[in-house]
Image: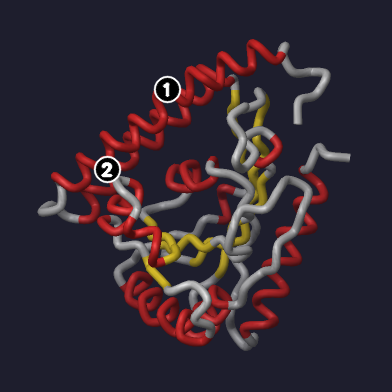
């Protein structure tokens, strides 16, 4: 997805190589430290993770000249909520940890078995669900999500389920909306165009500024899960039309 404004390909390749040399090593080191920190509180493990995310975003800016800008930060409420984020890239799995307060993610149960990355997820109280189990997966999400929200933690959900290419729209799944309906916690929709700079399954990272938009909290009061889902997904996709640079 190289454009005429990008540096020559060899420079892009070398910058990306510099990033990739450090990135996987940093995951192994951080996951190992998290495992060693197992006896301490979640808040202290979260503080350790914040050091890693800040470093990676800094390293991405230094090596690949890729930064980000946020609009709507004032919409983040003082109490916990449910984040509905567009999912285009690995970037948002890192950046959302800096943007929102202490949080847990919803992830496939099989990810827990991945060396280092999956172990780190498990140590950070990830909500693990069995993919493809339909109503059972939604029940797992609601039961675990209610408990995490009750502990004061935010919940991050990628309602499309998997990464989609820049300019595309996935099928929004209803589980997160059911969680909002049954718990009463608001949803904060998040749109971004990270996939234009850090595409899925792509070695090259383009320079630029990723645009992040955070919407006003969507109340669940008096709404069905389907109405909540349509409101959240509609806001995200409308916003994507505004911030995408793909024509």
Residue depicted at 37% across the width and 71% down the height? 149
In the image: residue 102, left or right of residue 72: left
Q: Residues within 10 Å of mark 2 (few under 14, many from 20)?
A: many
Q: Quadrant of residue 221?
A: bottom right
The residue under label 1 is 21
Q: Quadrant of residue 107?
A: bottom left
Cα separation, mark 1 vs mark 2, equals 17 Å
Residue depicted at 13% across the width and 52% down the height? 40
Residue depicted at 69% across the width and 42% down the height? 193
Q: Position of residue 168 (x, y in %)?
A: 77, 53
State which quarter of the image contains the C terminus: top right
Q: Is residue 10 above or below residue 106?
A: above
**Closer to the camera in the image, 120 or 239:** 120
Q: Position of residue 24 (x, y in %)?
A: 39, 33
State which quarter of the image contains the N terminus: top right
The residue under label 2 is 31
Q: Residues within 10 Å of mark 1 (few under 14, many from 20)?
A: few
Label 1, secondary structure: give it: helix
């Amino acid at each position: 997805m190289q454009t005429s404004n990008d540096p020559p390909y060899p420079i892009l390749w070398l910058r990306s190589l510099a990033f990739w040399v450090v990135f996987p090593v940093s995951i192994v080191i951080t996951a190992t430290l998290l495992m060693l920190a197992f006896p301490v509180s979640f808040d202290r493990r979260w503080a350790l993770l914040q050091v890693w995310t800040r470093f990676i975003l800094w390293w991405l800016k230094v090596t690949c000249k890729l930064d980000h800008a946020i609009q709507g930060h004032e919409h983040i409420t003082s109490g916990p909520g449910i984040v509905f984020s567009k999912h285009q890239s690995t970037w948002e799995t890192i950046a959302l940890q800096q943007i929102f307060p202490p949080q847990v993610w919803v992830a496939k149960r099989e990810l827990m078995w991945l060396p280092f990355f999956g172990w780190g997820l498990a140590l950070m109280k990830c909500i693990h669900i069995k993919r493809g189990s339909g109503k059972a997966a939604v029940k797992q999400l609601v039961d675990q999500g209610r408990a995490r929200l009750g502990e004061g933690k935010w919940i991050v959900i990628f309602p499309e389920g998997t990464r989609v290419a820049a300019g595309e729209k996935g099928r929004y799944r209803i589980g997160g909306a059911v969680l909002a309906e049954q718990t009463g916690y608001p949803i904060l929709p998040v749109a971004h165009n990270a996939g234009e700079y850090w595409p899925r399954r792509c070695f090259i990272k383009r320079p630029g500024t990723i645009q992040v938009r955070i919407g006003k909290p969507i109340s669940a009061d008096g709404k069905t899960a389907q109405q909540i889902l349509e409101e959240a997904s509609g806001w995200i996709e409308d916003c994507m039309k505004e911030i995408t640079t793909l024509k």
